[in-house]
Amino acid sequence: MSRSLIYHTQLTRNGTVSVESESGSVNTQLDAVSKSGIVLHCDNQALANIFPKTPSLSPKQSVKLDVDFGLPEVGRVTTTCDVVSLRRLSRDTFELQMNFAELNDRAVRAVEHYVERQLRISQNAKVTQLNTINLETLSSNEEKVRHVA
């Protein structure tokens, strides 16, 4: 994967992620995806199933988990991720930040294609919005000139 300034740009993506742990498969909610990893949200019960005997997490002692999730236009992505951060968002909602540990060539291309396409779409929407604002300002200024003359 190419490393650049936008390497860690996270794109909001709602969906379901299947996480394989020692106690079986658990479904969680996909919150964001980037070229370097994913962000998941889960409840207390799912968290207990994912980490049944894990006292703590840290970037230097990350936990590897197998995950499976889908992205539009590119299909399913199955990979191994390192959980590098776990934080509580509310009483029963937790956020897991995961970095991709092992991606095969197909998964790398799929994730990169999805992220780059979404960034292009986002950029084009911003340009279109700016053009619309500029046209509205221009026609408003023309009206003022006609009114004064």
Image: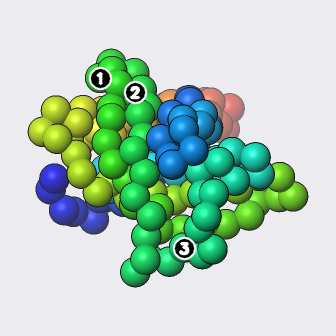
Depth check: 25 or 59 in front? 25
Name the residue located 42 percent from the left edge and 26 percent from the top edge: 70
SS type, badge 3: loop
How would you rate the neighbour count of disc 2 (Cα within 10 Å): few for under 14, some for 14-19, many for 20 or more? Answer: some
88, above or below 92, in the image: below
Quarter the C terminus occupies: top right
Q: Which mark is residue 71?
A: 2
What is the spatial separation of the Cα atoms under label 3 and label 1, in whole angstroms? 31 Å
Residue with the mark numbered 1: 74
How far apart are labels 3 and 2 at the CA level? 27 Å
Q: Which mark sits nearer the N-terminus, 3 or 2?
A: 3
Disc 3: CA contacts within 10 A as few (<14), some (14-19) or many (>=20): some
Q: What kind of colouring is applied to the model shown?
A: rainbow
Relative placement, left or right, of 129 versus 147 is left
Of all residues, the one furthest to the right in this rendering is 91
Residue appearing at x 54%, y 35% in the figure: 25
Name the amino acid type tagged 1.
Answer: Val
Percent coordinates x, y for residue 148 in the rendering: 66, 38
Q: Nearer the viewer, mark 3 or mark 1?
A: 3
The image shows residue 105 at horizontal and vertical percentages of 12, 39
Labels 2 & 1 near each other (Cβ < 8 A)? yes
Quadrant of residue 74 in the image?
A: top left
Circle 3: residue type: Leu
Mark 1 surroundings within 10 Å by alpha-carbon count, few (fewer than 14), some (14 through 19), many (20 or more): some
Residue 64 in sight from this viewpoint: yes
Q: Secondary structure at mark 2?
A: strand
Counting residues from the start of the chain, the first of labels 3 and 1 encountered is 3
Residue type at mark 2 is Leu
Report the front residue among 23 and 105. Answer: 23
Number of numbered discs overlaid on the protein picture: 3
Residue highlighted by disc 3: 57
Say whether residue 7 is left or right of residue 137: left
